Amino acid sequence: MNENLSNPEMDFEKMNSRKTKSGGINTEWILSQRGAKNEIDFHRPYDCMVEKERRPNGRVEDTAIIFLSNKECSFKCLMCDLWKNTSDNSAPVGAIPEQIEWALSRLPAARHIKLYNSGSFFDEKAIPKSDYPSIARLVDHYETVIVESHPRLIGEKCLEFRDLISGKLEVAIGLETAHPEILARLNKQMTLDDFKRGVEFLKRNGMNSRAFILLRPPFMTEEEGVAWAQKSIDFAFDCGVDSCTVIPVRAGNGAMEQLMKRGEFEMPDLTSLEKVLEYGVSQRRGLVFADLWDLELFSDCQACFQDRYERIHQMNLAQQILPRISCRHCT
């Protein structure tokens, strides 16, 4: 039986060109708010690094991360700024393996690897399927290979790539929020049922999954942002994910600035991220991480920020709730 969850012939870019969102927020409007993209080179990743991450076995181990230069994601999500390091054109066949080989020749050894392409690994306009064997050979010595995908693109291609690698395949999926109405307004072109089916497909076929969860997406108050991030963690684990990463929503893509002017978005406070991380860790249902990228944007106090950053970082690694940081400069 064909277990594809989406129509492989569906052209998501054409689908997204339709005015599908209410209140003037749709793909056309989102694109109209953008600035220029950064220049990328298809023969080099736009970044790479090694970071420590807590694993399901309880160990903290090194994970290589390669940010691949490729075609922009076919989905134009309202809050996304990853398009800045993508191209309007598809990478030529062989370019993605070349990027991975270049990065691995410069990175220190690690046991796990993330291949992040600012979109969906299983979108052939981004990662040609003919490159799968070459990619698999390059990452063959890693215990875990982590890629990202929209849930509607999870299907047979996952199985094909899984069967080419010797390590465990893990797929990161953007749940964003379990609030169904706000999820629809993010122009994500998915439902909660799509997410659930994607996770179930991965689990049924021996692959792990992690969920990306937004802290305070547009159209929420601070209190609602915290509550729905917590509910989203619960929903993701109910669906069967192995871990969740909580990402505070930031401005910077044009659309979010316009929503700020309209009073429909504010960036969350660092305290809210701490609350959601503490909640997720306390549930003991799986690993819960707080995203550390640009974390200073969410802090109003320079006096305690570094200590709070380190506390969140250590909670990510230990999966234990550590004492809150006391600061005489802020309440």
Image (cartoon, rainbow, N blue to C red):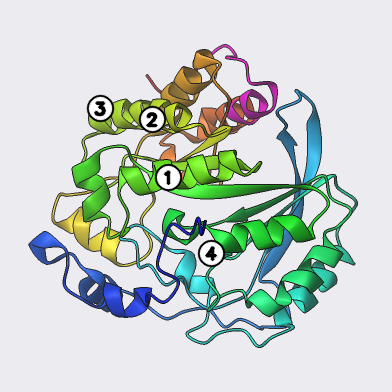
Of discs 2 and 1, which sits in the foreground?
1
Q: Earlier in the sequence, mark 4 or mark 2?
A: 4
Alpha carbon separation for disc pair 4 and 3: 29 Å
Of discs 4 and 3, which sits in the foreground?
4
Of discs 4 and 2, which sits in the foreground?
2
Q: Give above or below for 126 relative to 144.
A: below
Dot 1: element:
helix
Alpha carbon separation for disc pair 4 and 2: 24 Å
Of discs 4 and 1, which sits in the foreground?
1
Dot 3: element:
helix
Q: Name the residue carrying label 2.
A: 235
Alpha carbon separation for disc pair 2 and 1: 13 Å
Going by the numbered disc 1, the residue's amino acid type is Arg
The outermost residue toward the front is: 1
Alpha carbon separation for disc pair 3 and 1: 29 Å
Q: Are marks 4 and 1 in contact (CB under 8 Å)?
A: no
Q: Considering depth in this image, is 316 or 174 the residue closer to the camera?
A: 174
Q: Are marks 4 and 3 in contact (CB under 8 Å)?
A: no
Q: Give above or below for 42 relative to 4.
A: below
Q: Earlier in the sequence, mark 3 or mark 2?
A: 3
Q: Which mark is residue 311?
A: none
Q: Are marks 2 and 1 in contact (CB under 8 Å)?
A: no
Q: Give above or below for 119 relative to 32.
A: above
Q: Which mark is residue 197?
A: 1
Q: Which residues are magenta?
A: 312-324
Residue 276: x and y, percent? 43, 25
Q: Earlier in the sequence, mark 3 or mark 1?
A: 1
Alpha carbon separation for disc pair 4 and 1: 22 Å
Horizontal side of residue 198 vs 46, given as left or right: left
Residue 93 found in image quarter: bottom right
Alpha carbon separation for disc pair 3 and 2: 18 Å
